[in-house]
Image: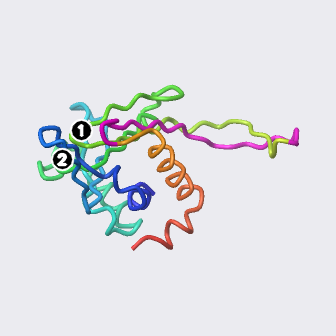
Amino acid sequence: ATSKALSKYPLLNASYVPEENRVMLWANHNIGIAMDTPRGLIVPVIKEAQKKSLTEIAEELNRLKQLAKEGSLPAEDLQGATFTLSNIGAIGGGGTYMSPIVTLPQVAIGALGQVQRVPRFTSNDSTDIYEAHIVNVSWGGDHRVVDGATLARFHTQWKEYLQDPITLIQEMK
């Protein structure tokens, strides 16, 4: 979902070069995935995510997780991220919202909270309630390059892909 949304918001898959006051847009979506390990935080990279199927992304993520767990990630798997996702919810933390810090020279980052089971009304006019599972997501951006409105639109697109996986799969490789 992240790579597909980045395709529609390429400014978020970029680097800022302050010495030249220049933004470099990247063709490849190299998604850094922050992971908590016994040795501390590491951010392995799913390279060229835009060229991969959902199955290939899952296989690559599993490979990276296994190597991270063993402490044997090669340097090339830790380099070249153009956008990062942090899943603080995976370790049960994060509260309601987080404040993710952009890893320079990247210009944007996302932080996912823990999935929560909550009651929701079926509509604004109803008192009927159903069980919903939600996750809070916080986005951070380098405001020299990206404004909040762009991040909000990106989030809406990202969320639509997650809520409608058929469309996501149809639009993927």
Magenta span covers which residues? 125-145
Q: Residues within 10 Å of mark 2 (few under 14, many from 20)?
A: some
Q: Amino acid at mark 2?
A: Leu
Quadrant location of the C terminus in the rendered image: bottom left
For this rendering, which residue is in front, 151 or 89? 151
Point out which mark residue 42 bears.
1
For this rendering, which residue is in front, 165 or 159? 159
**Where is 95 relative to 165, above or below?**
above
Q: Amino acid at mark 1?
A: Ile
Seen at 50% across and 73% down, the residue is: 170
Residues tagged 1 and 2 counted as in contact (Cβ below 8 A): yes
Residue 164 place in picture, x, y as percent: 59, 61
1 or 2: tag closer to the N-terminus: 1
**Where is 45 relative to 90, above or below?**
below
CA distance separating discs 1 and 2: 8 Å
Number of callouts in the render? 2
Residue 49 place in picture, x, y as percent: 32, 62
Q: Residue tagged by mark 2?
A: 78
**Where is 55 relative to 24, above or below?**
below
Point out which mark residue 169 bears.
none
For this rendering, which residue is in front, 142 or 159? 142
Seen at 49% across and 53% down, the residue is: 158
Seen at 23% across and 47% down, the residue is: 15
